[in-house]
Amino acid sequence: MIEVQHLTKRFNGKPVLRGVDFQVKEGEIFGYLGPNGAGKTTTMRIILGLLKPTSGRATVFGKDLGDNDDLRGRVGVLLENDGLYERLSAYENLSYYAQLYSVSNMEEKIQNLLKFVGLSDRQNDKVGTFSKGMKRRLALARSIIHDPDVLFYDEPSAGLDPEAQKMVRDLILRLSGEKGRTIFVNSHDLDEVQRVCSRIAILQNGEMRAYDTVENLRKKFSKPAVEVTLTDEKEAEKALDLLNSLDYVSECERDGLRITATVKGEKTSTIISVLARDGIKVEEAKKVTKSLEDVYLDIVRRSEGET
Amino acid sequence: MNSMNITMLVARKEIKEILKNKGLLFGSVWMGGSFGIVFSSQAYSLDNSVFSMALLAGVLVGYMFSGQVFLREKRGGIIETLLCTPLSLKSVWFGKVVGTTIPAYLISLLTVALVTIVSGITLHSFLFPSVVMLIHIFVVVPVFIVSAISLMGLCQFLFGMRENKIMGYLVMLGLLPFIFPNLIGGFIQGEMSLVVSWAEVAVLLVVSVLLLALTTYLSRYLSKEKIVTTIP
């Protein structure tokens, strides 16, 4: 569906992308993560045909979008900018894009979409009078007015309130679930990516640092850890000294009465028995799984260390 | 959809946006109108005033409109979304040129009408432009305006914001003496005695066509990458 092969891009000799490779399968929600300046937007612009790669290839349905006007009719986009005309009304904006995409049953589709994004009662108001959240919702409606097969979303819920963010997430899941659309999401919002994406790629300094399912990345980058909560300060100090002395504990962090111990191998269960043997009173103990945020930060920091 | 329909679709949207921008519309009508009134009071020769004013109003108002149609859309990043639609870059550019030229030309005609009416009132006798002037108004002026807007729109798409600012000064300062050779000549001589000839109108038509040809040639350098990489 979307294929990126050995993609490189230089601006004035400065490399922005350095041999990026990935594939997005049909019906997949793909998350593209990375810090600012990593090259995410450049990758998306190359796939959309807005930029030419220095070398390598980016195709959608096996073709270059930049050279295929008709093929772009099967693609919907929501970029960083909403792409809306502020002096036109919500209805006029949707109507303009519907005509550009030669949408049939235009009137019905516009009304359905306005209802779907909760803007029916504001359809005749100028977009310039809308809040950021309302504009983003309208832009989402615009991106699917022509019923595209593939969607490219760049920071879809940036600047939205939690309710609107949830609406965006639900919409993405619904768009993928109902019609099996392929969705490419550029995002900083790790929580959003974790909730909606089946596979992710992490980009840093123009290079791919990770590319797998969220679960596999967690497994790959997570070390087993145990979080124990002690009853008081004295117990916590004793426990910290003891855990630091164990050769299979690689890292120990204390936060008040809570200690997180990263252990080598499968020795998580032994931690509790060791503490109990020394008479240390444990209030609570649990196995810790790394969140996508932890995995992401690990990968990014590790890469920063390498460079 | 065929290319003509696409062009007209883009052009209609641009005209609609210009009409909805009350400040811009009022400013341009005011400029065209005030030029018409001010210069008609100095109309030693109606032909000379109309010759200059039709071009001046058309190009300057065209520049004001192109600022919204090309530059504002680029500055705001809306152009990026538009370039992801099935429209070709040439269709987008041409549609915008048409959508800017039509209102700019209408304001140019308004200026001509005001020059004619007000000078008629001042001179206590209504004069109508000569045949050569009618050819100028209905053939040469639209060709010149479309050429100028095409070139300005192309530059606004190709260049960054700083270069566009410089271009703005050039249009405002540099273009005036070229548009008003007769007017400047008249001021230097202390009177405006020149009457526009067929030769002058023909030369201007040739210049307009050459400008259009130059813009068409330069349009080969227009690319999505050039536009996207110069978005601020």
Image (spheres, helix red, strand yellow):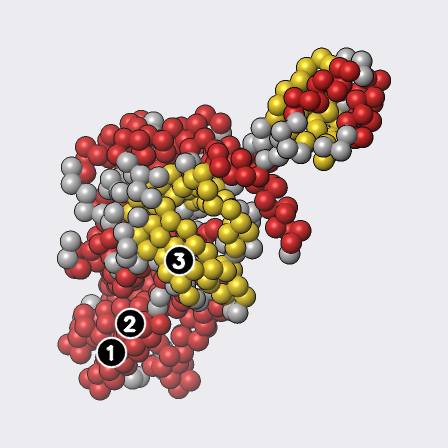
Residue A74: x, y in percent? 25, 47
Label 3: few (<14), some or many (≥20) within 10 Å?
Answer: some
The residue to which callout 3 is attached is A5
The residue to which callout 2 is attached is B147
Task: Give left or right: position of B38 versus B119.
Answer: right
Give, as a three-letter code, the residue at label 2. Answer: Ser
Q: Are marks 3 and 1 on the same chain?
A: no
Q: Nearer the viewer, mark 3 or mark 1?
A: 3
Q: Are marks 1 and 2 on the same chain?
A: yes
* Front in this rendered view, residue A207 or A148: A207
* Residue B209, numbered label: 1
* Front in this rendered view, residue A171 or B101: A171
**Does residue A81 sit above or below B35 in this rendering?**
above
Q: Image point 77% across, 30% down: which residue?
A: A246
Task: Give left or right: position of A207 versus A58.
Answer: right
* Front in this rendered view, residue B24 or A80: A80
Task: Please give the chain letter of the residue carrying mark 1.
Answer: B
- Element under disc 1: helix
Q: CA distance from mark 3 to mark 1?
A: 46 Å
Q: CA distance from mark 1 to mark 2?
A: 7 Å
Q: CA distance from mark 2 to mark 3?
A: 42 Å
Give, as a three-letter code, the residue at label 3. Answer: Gln
